[in-house]
Image (cartoon, rainbow, N blue to C red):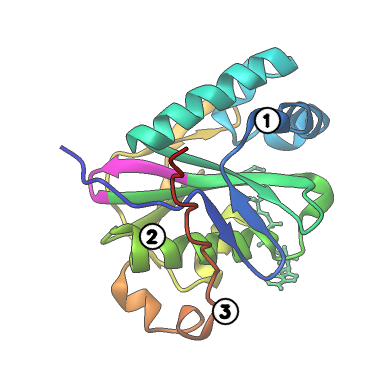
Amino acid sequence: MTASYRVPTRIETERLVLRTYVEADAEQLVEVVTRNLEHLRPYMEWIQFEPQTVADRREWIAGEAEKFAAGTGFTMGMFDADGVLVGGSGFHVRSDPDGLEIGYWIDAAHEGKGLVTEAAAALTLVALDTAGAAVVTIGHAPTNARSSAVPRRLGYRQRDLGGKQCFDAGEMAPAVEWVADASTLTSEPLASWPRPVVPASPRPTSR
Ligand SMILES: CC(C)(COP(=O)(O)OP(=O)(O)OC[C@H]1O[C@@H](n2cnc3c(N)ncnc32)[C@H](O)[C@@H]1OP(=O)(O)O)[C@@H](O)C(=O)NCCC(=O)NCCS
């Protein structure tokens, strides 16, 4: 059995808001993903199900909300300060090793600004500091140099965890895997990384 994690539904960084999708995000999600099909095609396995309609996306958002509530997957959108969707991220729950795995993609128009590194740093800190994960992993296809640079930049250690496959240009390939744990938080750059803000969840009101 996998562990249960306390993942917040909203995380704020210097330039981003990472939060669960709501139904009203469906239009933006369709627009951004459809505009990025060729950018995402080599490494995102779900691209085979694109393009989707707004109705498909609403259904998908509802499904992701159920997984979040059940603790089986923690998908989040990456929004800028104006609420514009710039990418997607969040955690997969993995069991070997027991921990959280960060995934990410970004709109090609926003590549190269450090936004993914900023999101991954915040997710790493939240996972290890508050969500209850002992390890956080990032895995990518061997040819995905831009993805590889993200965990490397954050002080993750490359580790052969054995067996995990990654989508690589239409085929599955052995993933390159990176791991962060408590020792990563006390090493640079995460030791002095700006702490993400996790707003308190609203209290349920009785009326
Ligand atoms: C993989 C992917 C998410 C990486 O995105 P990215 O934009 O390269 O990553 P970041 O947002 O962290 O940006 C890093 C770049 O911004 C630069 N940068 C600028 N300001 C920065 C800052 N404040 N902090 C860190 N980096 C900064 C870095 O130097 C780096 O530039 P370089 O690529 O010229 O070396 C993106 O290429 C993508 O969406 N690819 C398609 C989907 C995919 O492969 N997803 C991953 C599957 S495992």
Q: Of the residues shown, which amino acid type is indicated by label 2? A: Ala
Query: Answer yes or no: do the residues labelled 3 and 2 have beta carbons within 8 Å?
Result: no
The number of callouts visible is 3
Q: Can residue 67 be seen? A: yes
Q: Is residue 137 magenta?
A: no
- What's the mark number on residue 196? none
**Mark 3 vs mark 2, CA separation in Å:** 15 Å
Answer with left or right where residue 96 lies relative to residue 52: left
Q: Of the residues shown, which amino acid type is indicated by label 1? A: Arg
Q: Which stretch did the figure color magenta? A: 91-98
- In terms of secondary structure, where does tag 2 sit? helix
Look at the picture and state if 93 lies above or below 28: below
Magenta span: predominant SS is strand
Which residue is denoted by mark 1 in the rendering?
41
Query: Comparing marks 1 and 2, which lies closer to the viewer?
Result: 2
Please provide percent x and percent y for residue 104: 58, 47
Which residue is denoted by mark 3 in the rendering?
194
Answer with left or right where residue 107 lies relative to residue 71: right
- In terms of secondary structure, where does tag 1 sit? loop
Please provide percent x and percent y for residue 113: 76, 64
Q: Please give the name of the residue rendered at 31% of the width and 68% of the height, measured from the top-left corner.
A: 181
Please name whichever residue, 197 or 122, is drawn nearer the observer in this view of the structure. Answer: 197
Look at the picture and state if 188 lies above or below 157: below
Please provide percent x and percent y for residue 111: 76, 55
Q: Which part of the image, by quadrant, shows the N terminus?
A: top left
Counting other residues with Cα less than 10 Å from the Cα at mark 2, is it few (<14), some (14-19), or many (20 or more)? many
